Amino acid sequence: MTDYALSDETRAKFKKISTASIATALYKRGLRNQFIQNVVPVSPKAETMVGQAFTLRYIPAREDRNPITVFRNADHPQRVAIETCPAGHVLVMDARKDARAATAGSILITRLALRGAAGVVSDGGFRDAEGIGALDMPAYYAKPSAPTNLTLHEALDINVPISCGDVAVFPGDVLVGDRDGVMVVPADLADELADECSEMECYEDFVLEQVRSGEPIIGLYPRTKEEYEQRYADWRARANR
């Protein structure tokens, strides 16, 4: 658990930052395994997903513990997670990368969206994926999967450290998701990464404009030639960046 609270300012900065820039900034700090593997958008969204992690851990289902009647229990962890994930957070599910059965369906994810969640990420499957994709809220999964979660998964723990797509996710970590996928940012690095990556994005916009106009890469990206220092400063002034 963490006492970190994602500020509106930092959230707004991450909304304009790519997962690629975040991956590079984390790599510079020695963190090489923060991109959730084999997870894709259910449906690409125009706006980047940003929110702190609220987690749900599944273990392999055992038949005597997971009849269909368990959904009648008011304390069923899957249902409780949907109803307690704080607004502005991302529900992150650990399905052990097993997408043969769903981890949720469109009814539960619609409820999550209406409660104000910033998104949902599962390294397993979703059922009724078309309905989930139609929501405004970003959702990421391994693939569509019709079988109920009880077939293979037992929801067990809420808001504990989990693995999702081979990445350690701790409650309160900041998740950033774009069309490429989802990065996990340790909470204690979130504010400084937002600042650093904002500058990276600005310079890369300048670089892309230069490349499109025929400029060679060497000395420009990365910036090792002094001539580009002034050209970048002039570009920022003109672009009000």
Image: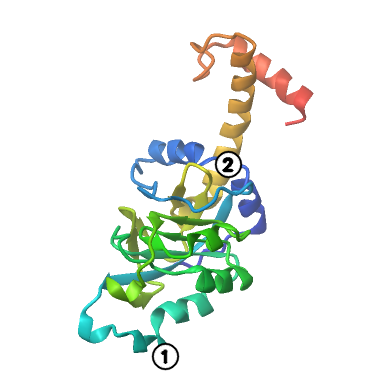
Does 183 appear above or below 75?
Answer: above
Would residue 163 be found to the left or right of residue 204 on screen? left
Query: Residue sitting at 52 percent across and 79 percent down?
Result: 83
Q: Nearer the viewer, residue 175 or 107?
A: 107
Residue 208 appears in which quarter of the rendering?
Answer: top right
Residue at the disc numbered 1:
72
Residue 240: tell me if it is visible: yes
As displayed, is residue 200 above or below residue 118? above
Q: Percent position (x, y) of residue 199?
A: 60, 34
> In this view of the protein, which residue sits in the foreground, 127 or 39?
127
> Residue under circle 2?
17
Mark 1 nearby-residue class (10 Å; few <14, some 14–19, many ≥20): few
Q: Amino acid at mark 2?
A: Ile
Q: What is the crowding at mark 2: few (fewer than 14 residues within 10 Å), some, or many (at least 20)?
A: many
Point out the frontmost of discs 2 and 1: 1
Pick the front one: 204 or 182: 182
Q: Which residue occupies 30% across, 53% down?
A: 166
Mark toward the start of the polypeptide (2 vs 1): 2
Residue 237's tag is none
Q: Disc 1 marks which amino acid?
A: Arg
Side of 87 where 141 appears, left or right: left
How far across and how far down the image is residue 99, in percent?
32, 60
User: Could you tell me if residue 153 is visible in this image?
Assistant: no
In which quadrant of the rendered image does the C terminus lie?
A: top right
Q: Quadrant of the N terminus?
A: bottom left
Rounded to the nearest angstrom, the CA distance separating label 2 from label 1 is 42 Å
Give residue 16's quadrant in the image.
top right
Say how the picture is coloured: rainbow
Q: Position of residue 91 (x, y in %)?
A: 48, 66
